[in-house]
Amino acid sequence: AANDADEGDTLLVGPGEYNPVELEVNDLTIESAEGPEQTTVEDDFDDELLDGPEDITSFLGDFEGESEPLAAFDDTTFDAGEVTIDGFTIDADGMAFNFPGSGSDASFRIRNNVINGAEIGISIGNPGDGEVFLEDNEFVNNAVGVRLNALPDFTETVEITDNEFTDDADFAYVIDVNEFLDLDTIKGENGFDLDAVEDEVDGDTALVPEDG
């Protein structure tokens, strides 16, 4: 149904369990009717949870040659407009959200979701002049909460606000590959206390648990 929609449509999804979604339509909102308690999307990537930062590169390499979709919500062709995902539980073995970007002008709004058990909860890379809004999501028991690989001008429009990280991030809450995010602002706007410290994960700047 998602890829039969017209640009600008809003798809209202009823309660139930759903397979991964590979998005091919620009400018689309997908919203659950009854919220994350009643609406679940599961990926089928079979892997064990990452043990440490040294596993990130090999994990991402595992996706090469895999059939798509590569995440519960996967968008490898989105190049303009805005996609909004609102109100789902995502039980992900691999990635919950994969938006590579590839220098496009795409924007992403991910809000009111529960992201559970993923290797990488949200992975977003280099969407040119696009914007990213990660709002009111709950991250639970993911190895990495958010991995952002973005350009300097792009990260000026990144907003990570009012999210909750619960038993999350064996070694990283947020990874900033190119070190352009204001991690102090992210800490202040997502309820982190002193157990969220800045450190390096696989050579990248990150928020990590105190004992991470």
Image (tube, rainbow, N blue to C red):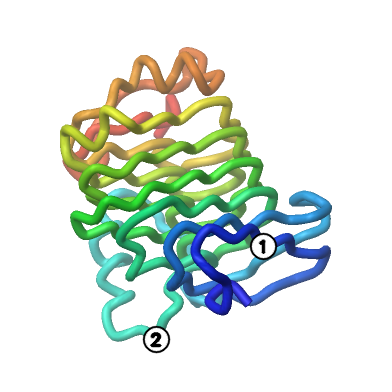
- Residue under numbered circle 1: 11
Residue 140 vs residue 130, the one in the foreground: 130
Residue 4 vs residue 188, the one in the foreground: 4
Residue 146 vs residue 193, the one in the foreground: 146
Amino acid on which disc 2 is placed: Ser
Q: In which quarter of the image is residue 10?
A: bottom right
Residue 180 point in image, percent of width and height: 20, 29
Mark 2 or 1: in front is 1
Residue 194 seen in this snapshot: yes
Crowd rating for badge 2 (residues with CA inside 10 Å; few <14, some 14–19, many 20+)? few
Seen at 64% across and 49% down, the residue is 86
Q: In which quarter of the image is residue 32?
A: bottom right
Q: Distance between the residues labelled 2 and 1?
A: 25 Å
Number of marks in picture: 2
Residue 93 seen in this snapshot: no
Q: Is residue 65 shown left or right of residue 49? A: left
Crowd rating for badge 1 (residues with CA inside 10 Å; few <14, some 14–19, many 20+)? some
Residue 193 point in image, percent of width and height: 51, 14
Seen at 42% across and 29% down, the residue is 159
Seen at 38% across and 16% down, the residue is 185
Quarter of the image containing the C terminus?
top left
- Rendered position, 58 above or below 151: below
Q: In which quarter of the image is residue 201?
A: top left
Q: Is residue 70 shown left or right of residue 10? A: left
Amino acid on which disc 1 is placed: Leu
Residue 167: mark in rendering: none
- Rendered position, 175 above or below 13: above
Quarter of the image containing the N terminus?
bottom right
Residue 67: mark in rendering: 2
**Kind of element beneath mark 2:** loop
Residue 132 point in image, percent of width and height: 39, 40
